[in-house]
Each structure stands twice: as C-alpha cells, then as structure tokens.
Amino acid sequence: MRNFNRLIVNEWLKMSRKKSFLIPFLIVLVLPLLVGYVSHTFSTQTPEPGGAFMKDSLLPSGIGQIVTILAVIGTAGMVAKEYSLGTIKFLLIRARSRTVILGSKYMTALLYGFTLTLVTLISGFTAEMIWFADGIQSLDVQMILMSLLYGLVYTAVYVTFGFMMGILTTSTGATIGITMFVIMLDKIMIFRDFYKYMLFPNMNLSVYQDGGAPLPGMTLSFSSIVLSVYTLLFLLISFTVFRRRDVA
Amino acid sequence: MNQETTVQHHSAAVLQMKGVSKIIKGKAIVDKLSFEIRKGEIVGLLGPNGAGKTTTIRMMTGLIKMSEGDVIVNGYSMREHFNSAIAHIGAIIENPEFYPYMTGLENLRQYQRMTDQLEPGRIDEVVRLVGLQDAMNKKVKAYSLGMRQRLGIAQALLHRPKLLILDEPTNGLDPAGIREMREYMRTIAEVEGISILISSHMLAEIEQICHRAVVIQNGRLITVSELGTARRTDEHVILTLRVDSVEAAVVVAEQQEGVELMEAEPEIRQIRVKMMDSRVPDFVKALGARGVGLYRISEDKQSLEEEFLKWTGGNQIA
Ligand SMILES: Nc1ncnc2c1ncn2[C@@H]1O[C@H](COP(=O)(O)OP(=O)(O)OP(=O)(O)O)[C@@H](O)[C@H]1O
Ligand SMILES: [Mg+2]
C-alpha cells in the first residue's frame, strides 16, 4: 500500500509540476463566483434559496460539465504523454507490474477530477452563502450531496473514457478531441428503445430527481447499472491493452 | 585492451538469454538468441544497423514480449517473476528521456519512489558518480545530450542493479563525451561491481572496454568472442620484424626450432614469422646472438574489425 501511494505521489507530481496546473483550478474557483454574481446582480429570476445554485454548479447540466471537461483535459495526457515523451521506457522497467502502474494512474486521474469538484463545491458554497441562501440552515443538504454525487459520477465516467482513449490512441490531442466530441454528443436523444442501453442517456443521473426519465423504462438503478457496466468495460479494455502492448 | 579486471569464468550468470525470439508478422527479428552475462563482466552486443540489438534489449527489460524463450536474471525468469527479475536490471534503451519540465533531482526522485527500499543518500551517491551535482536543480529540458546520458546512468543505478544495460550509450556524443562515457562505465563496473551490457555497431568502442563481444546479425547469434583475456602462452602468434638484414634473419628463422617463416620482404626489410607464444624470447635471443639488428617487433593481430566484417559479411545493413 505504501508503494502504491508513492506511485500516486509520482503521478500527481507529473501533473502538478507543469506550469499550467493551476489554471483549471482557478477556472472552477472563479466560475461559480462569477456566475453567482452575474445572476444575482443582473438576472430577474434568481435561484431558490435552498441551495439550488450550488446544485447547478455541481450538475452536468450546469457548471458541473465544465468541471468534467477540465478533468478530461487534465488527465488526457497521463498515459499518452509517457509515450510521446518516451518516458514510458523508464517507467516500465521498474519492479512494478504494469497493472499497478496503470492502477496508480487511474486513481490519480479520479483524484484530480474529485479535487476539481471539491474546489467547485467550495466556490459554489461561497457564492450560495453570499448571494442566495438565507443562512446555512436553509440549505437542502441532502439535495446538495446528491448533486455532488451525480456530478462526480458524470466526471468519473468521462475521465475513465478519456483514460481509455489515452491508452488506445497514445495521443493527448486525439484523446481530448474524441472525448470532447462524445461529451457534446451526449445531449442528443434518440427516441428508440435500444438507445437506453447506450452510455449517453444514462450519464446524467440527476434527471430522475423529479420523477422523470429520459426514455420509458429507465430508472435510477437501471442507469447506475448501465454506467457501471460501461465503466468496467472501459477499464477492462484499458488494462488489457496497456498490459499487453509492446513498447517500441 | 588494457583491461585490468580479469574475468571470472566460472562465476554465476547474472543474465541468461535462453533461445529468445521475437517474431513480428511472421518474420524473426530476433531468432533463438542464447548467451549469458557473468558477474562483473562487461559484454558488448555487437551488430550492424538493424541487427536486432534494440529489440533484444527491449525483451531483456520486458518492454516487449518475447515470442519464445526466456530471460533469466539472477535466477528469476522474466516471464514468471517480472518484478524480481527486473529489480536487478538498470537500463537506458535508445535515448534517455525524462520529464523535461522537472529538474534532474525531481526526475530521479520519481524513480526512487518506485524502488522497494528508499535509501536517503543513494541519489547523492549516484549523482556524484556521474558528476551531475551542479545540474541537479536545473530543469532537464536545459540539459545537453551528454548530461541526459549521465542522468540516465544515475537513474539506472539508483536501485543497485546487478546488471546495467546500455543501448548505444555513445550515440550522438562528441569524442570527449564518448571518452567520458567509457570512463564512467569503467568506474561503475569497479565502484558498483556490476555487470554491464553495451550494445553498439561500432567495433572500436566494444573493443576498448568489453571483456566479451556477442555478435549478432539479422537477429541471429554469429559468434561470441573473448576480448580482454590474457593471451595464453600455448597459442600461436604472428610477428612482423623489421631487421637490418633480411637474409640473416631468414637464416635464423629457418634454423630456429618451432619457428615458421611466413614471409620475407627484403625491400622493406621485414619478415613475418609464426611461432608459439612461449618461444618468442628464445627467437629474439637467437637473432641477437647472430648479430641481426632488430628495429621493430610487432604482433599481427587480426583485429576485431576484420573478424567482424568476416562474421557479418561486410557492412551490409539488414
Ligand atoms: N515493431 C516492429 N515491427 C516490424 N519490424 C520491426 C519492429 N521493430 C523493429 N523492427 C525491425 O527489426 C530489425 C531490428 O531492429 P532493431 O531496432 O532491434 O535493430 P538495432 O540492432 O537496434 O539497429 P540500430 O543499430 O539501427 O539501432 C530492423 O530491421 C527493424 O526494422
Ligand atoms: Mg538500436
């Protein structure tokens, strides 16, 4: 376990030693405050005081999607960059299996996404308290926590998808391009029965909050299962390919 | 071949290649290669461009899968116990590539965190060995190729391997850099007491530093040649002598027991003779006794270069 933690430290340093590391954190710090300020000052319809603003800043339908996009961009190079820099050679000739090395990278990718979400949460909370809430007691804590969970799930699934693409393409640019394209696509709804088994209509779990469903026959547990199956599939492909591939 | 350290012929092998092949699209890039590297030995992996040196080294380090055969490192099979096997190897494969936005020290720390035992002073030790003390806090993107090579060696030595594998370590270095590299390798073999495998397509390089050369071509083993060993006295030597009188020298050579006259060239006052190594002193004495003036005596060594060209059939590139 100590050994595994040290690998995570390594991966985190590889990201954090880059000059651009702080930019996404600044974005998710400033964005909820900016949006909060603008909608408080200029909008006629202000969000309800119970924590609706915080909820919007976490969900994929709101600022949450930007968090996901930033998380994908930040983690797209985790595997691909090792190939393009050539550092993959020194990385793999250590007394650590490829499974463990990739595992530490995946954990760090999730950690990165969660850290971005945490900063968003703090910033969204601050905006909420300054402009919208009637005191901290008025917040609907359960709703906020559920939104946090849905936001994290959305981010985690796309980070996993991007992680797989990074391994398959070994190109940071292609990984970002493909994953962004897919994130854009997930807004499209095809009203056919087969479509409920696709990834996209299941991505945003918050749609079930007010009793609705994207397509007939879909429920929260149905979507949870579909998401789990896809995530496991992405991981299976990632680890299988990474373990087997010749490093030339 | 001024190698002070003698090879211990019967010591255990640090690495054994056992019929290792790499087959890509039906073509054997490396073909049933078997050889071994003994403890404390410096071995050259020699072959023309495209011979399969890098491919061989990639298999030794687990970067690519073997199609058949196995590599045994310090008793551990690369296939069955990768972690235990690779723990005894330090390597640079082709160019040494680091994270350019990190300092030399930060890069080394990356690899230190991947070792089982963290030895606090070890980084300083290897950095001093390669003489990079002053560059440790510089970003690697500001390093010259020579500096990156040295950092590469530091990286490879960090976990105290028993075998150091260097793929074309002098590639792209200037003559001073090449000499420096050679000195490091000697120092490392001595200070750290480890075996070294150096791949190269340059004979001179291998000849100067290695105890043995493993010659490959088209992925196949051509020969293994001992280089740095002391000459045995029961071997024949061929000598070229420059004398004041060829006729007198020829007479001596013909009369002297065990000496075979190969060639006499009166125009340039030289003779070539072949004899057992142990008979050379007597022959020289006999020349002196007959009053033959001796200007030069030199050994006609068939250099590795000639042998190499013979083995590999000229300089054709596979
Ligand atoms: N992935 C691959 N697919 C197909 N052929 C390959 C592959 N990798 C290497 N080869 C071929 O295998 C042969 C050996 O390549 P290798 O790089 O091992 O040679 P080398 O001895 O290191 O040569 P050099 O001195 O030029 O570095 C070459 O002909 C090369 O084209
Ligand atoms: Mg090569």
Image: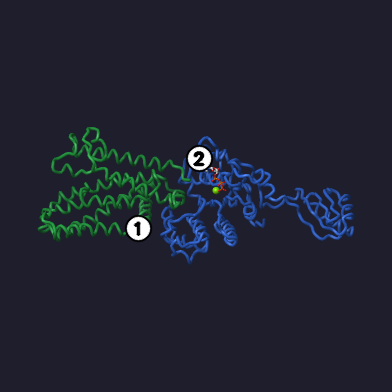
Q: Which amino acid, by three-letter code, is at mark 2?
A: Met
Please say whether residue B282 is visible from this viewpoint.
Answer: no
Using the image as rendered, state which of residue A185 and residue A95 is in the foreground: A185
Q: Which residue is mark 1?
A: A16
- Kindly report the distance in space between the C-alpha atoms of the residues bearing marks 2 and 1: 36 Å
**Viewer-nearest residue: B107 or A150:** A150
* Residue placed under numbered mark 2 in the picture: B66
Number of numbered tags placed on the structure image: 2
Compared with B203, A221 (above or below) is above
**Front residue of B84 and B64:** B64
**Amino acid type, callout 1:** Ser
Name chain A's colour: green
Mark 2 belongs to chain:
B
Q: Quadrant of residue B118?
A: bottom left
Q: Position of residue A124 (x, y in %)?
A: 19, 56
Q: Residue at x 75, y 48 (%)?
A: B235
